[in-house]
Amino acid sequence: MLSGTPRAFIGSTTFQVTGMTCAHCQRAVTEEISRIDGVESVTVDLPSGTVTVTAARPVDRADIAQAIDEAGYTLVP
């Protein structure tokens, strides 16, 4: 998993994700991550392959990785 990202985070954290290429990818990732308790917002930047997640209370990055996997994409370790 991301070595530079804390195990749990509050506030905004950016993740690198592979495989996202279109609006469908953006929607799928946003929907899956948005289901995680504590997540306030999700911003997907397709050109850079990043996903920025803002959380109101502690969110475990393993939950983010699982949501990205459920959407069909891969979190870059």
Image (cartoon, rainbow, N blue to C red):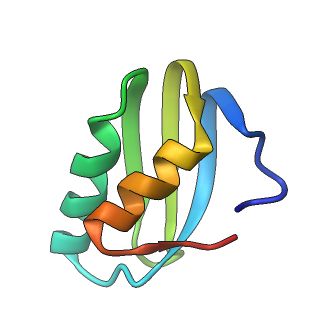
Q: Is 68 on the left or on the right of 10, as rendered? A: left
Q: Which residue lies furthest to the top in this view?
A: 57
**18 or 36, which is in the foreground?**
36
Q: Residue at 43% of width from left, 21% of height from top?
A: 38
Q: Residue at 50% of width from left, 74% of height from top?
A: 49
- Residue 69 x %, y %: 39, 66
Q: Is 51 on the left or on the right of 72, as rendered? A: right
Q: Is 63 on the left or on the right of 22, as rendered? A: right
- Residue 16 x %, y %: 59, 67
Where the C terminus falls, by quadrant? bottom right
With respect to residue 40, does 14 lie above or below? below
Where the N terminus falls, by quadrant? bottom right
- Residue 36 x %, y %: 36, 33
With respect to residue 43, does 35 lie above or below? above
With respect to residue 24, does 37 lie above or below? above
**63 or 49, which is in the foreground?**
63
Q: Residue at 30% of width from left, 74% of height from top?
A: 72
- Residue 2 x %, y %: 74, 60
Residue 28 found in image quarter? bottom left
